[in-house]
Image: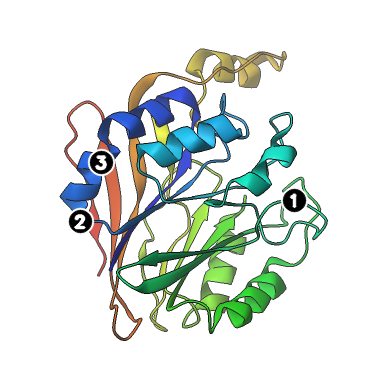
């Protein structure tokens, strides 16, 4: 069983890339399921039901979210109708939306959930470590394999939860910073791990935003709108392979595919 997981989808450029190329990429990588973080999919901040459906129709089977989950007006009224979307599991229980998903492929069940980090992050959330443990226990009899996302600012918090969950889940991956890390590997307990997958969007940018506007903010400190950039669009993520019989993680590969040439640049860490 092969699962492709994509870093944060950024705005229209990221969505358009998926619509144009994801089906071919799925066939090329022989991916059974595709997951993606969609918290920046609508205008670079948040998501709407319309953009979520657009991403699903492009070929993404499940969408996770992060700290920008409620940035778009009225999404809190839409999320319950989207059975392929889950919000961060450690938000207050009064928040709408699902705190996990279970997806089926070839008769096997894959559990998926996200936790938000607490260091330098805005939302007030429950402990991601405790929340992850609770959901893993809940999903023990509901899923044959588990994929966990840590949406967090600091690498140290991501690494800590990676080691904390090693041996308990098949894959734990980080999102939020939009820059892929080079530490993807299978940990000693058998869990695949990468601190940050990067993003699905324009690499000729500052984290997906217009270069000139972002640089200007740093240079003179004046407020500016930073629109989503347009150049060098592609996807970044990882591909994990799971034994459908034993549930063991067999392989891990970092994935990068750019629009210019659609030639993948990957590092096999299996």
Horizontal relation, residue 266 to residue 52: left or right:
left
Q: Quadrant of residue 40?
A: top right
Image position, residue 51 (x, y; %): 52, 31
Residue of label 1: 96
* Precedes in sequence: disc 3 or disc 2: 3
Mark 2 crowdedness (10 Å alpha carbons): few <14, some 14-19, many ≥20: some
Tell me the distance, in whole angstroms, between the alpha carbons under discs 3 and 2: 10 Å
> Which is in the foreground here, disc 1 or disc 2?
1
Element class at badge 3: helix
Tell me the distance, in whole angstroms, between the alpha carbons under discs 1 and 3: 31 Å
Image position, residue 237 (x, y; %): 37, 49
Question: What residue is shown at x 54% (from left), y 66% (from top)?
Answer: 159
Residue of label 3: 23
Mark 1 crowdedness (10 Å alpha carbons): few <14, some 14-19, many ≥20: some
Observer-nearest residue: 38 or 230? 38
Q: Which quadrant holds the N terminus?
A: bottom left
Question: What residue is shown at x 69% (from left), y 71% (from top)?
Answer: 131
Observer-nearest residue: 216 or 248? 248
Establish if 164 lies above or below 183.
below
Horizontal relation, residue 250 to residue 54: left or right:
left
Question: What residue is shown at x 36% (from left), y 61% (from top)?
Answer: 184
Res 206 seen here: no
* Precedes in sequence: disc 1 or disc 3: 3
Image position, residue 50 (x, y; %): 55, 30
Badge 3 vs badge 2, beta-carbon distance below 8 Å = no
Residue of label 2: 30
């Amino acid at each position: 069983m092969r699962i492709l997981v994509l870093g944060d989808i950024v705005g229209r450029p990221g969505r358009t890339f998926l619509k144009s190329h994801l089906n071919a990429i799925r066939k090329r990588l022989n991916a059974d399921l595709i997951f993606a973080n969609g918290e920046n999919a609508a205008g670079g901040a948040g998501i709407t039901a319309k953009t979520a459906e657009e991403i699903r129709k492009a070929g993404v089977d499940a969408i996770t979210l992060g700290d920008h989950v409620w940035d778009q007006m009225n999404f809190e009224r839409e999320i319950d109708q989207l059975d392929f979307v889950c919000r961060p599991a450690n938000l207050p229980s009064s928040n709408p939306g699902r705190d996990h998903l279970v997806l089926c492929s070839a008769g096997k069940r894959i559990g998926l959930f996200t936790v938000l980090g607490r260091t330098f992050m805005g939302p007030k959330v429950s402990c991601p470590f405790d929340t992850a443990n609770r959901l893993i226990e809940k999903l023990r009899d509901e899923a044959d394999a588990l994929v966990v996302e840590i949406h967090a600012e600091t690498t140290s918090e991501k690494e800590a939860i990676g080691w904390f969950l090693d041996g308990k889940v098949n894959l734990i991956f980080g999102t939020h910073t939009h820059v892929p890390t080079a530490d993807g590997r299978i940990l000693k307990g058998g869990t695949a791990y990468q601190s940050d997958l990067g993003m699905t969007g324009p690499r000729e940018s500052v984290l997906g935003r217009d270069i000139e506007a972002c640089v200007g903010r740093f240079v003179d400190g004046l407020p500016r709108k930073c629109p989503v950039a347009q150049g060098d669009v592609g996807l970044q993520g990882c591909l994990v392979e799971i034994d459908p019989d034993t549930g063991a993680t067999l392989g891990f590969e970092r994935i990068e595919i750019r629009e210019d040439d659609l030639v993948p640049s990957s590092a096999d860490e299996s």
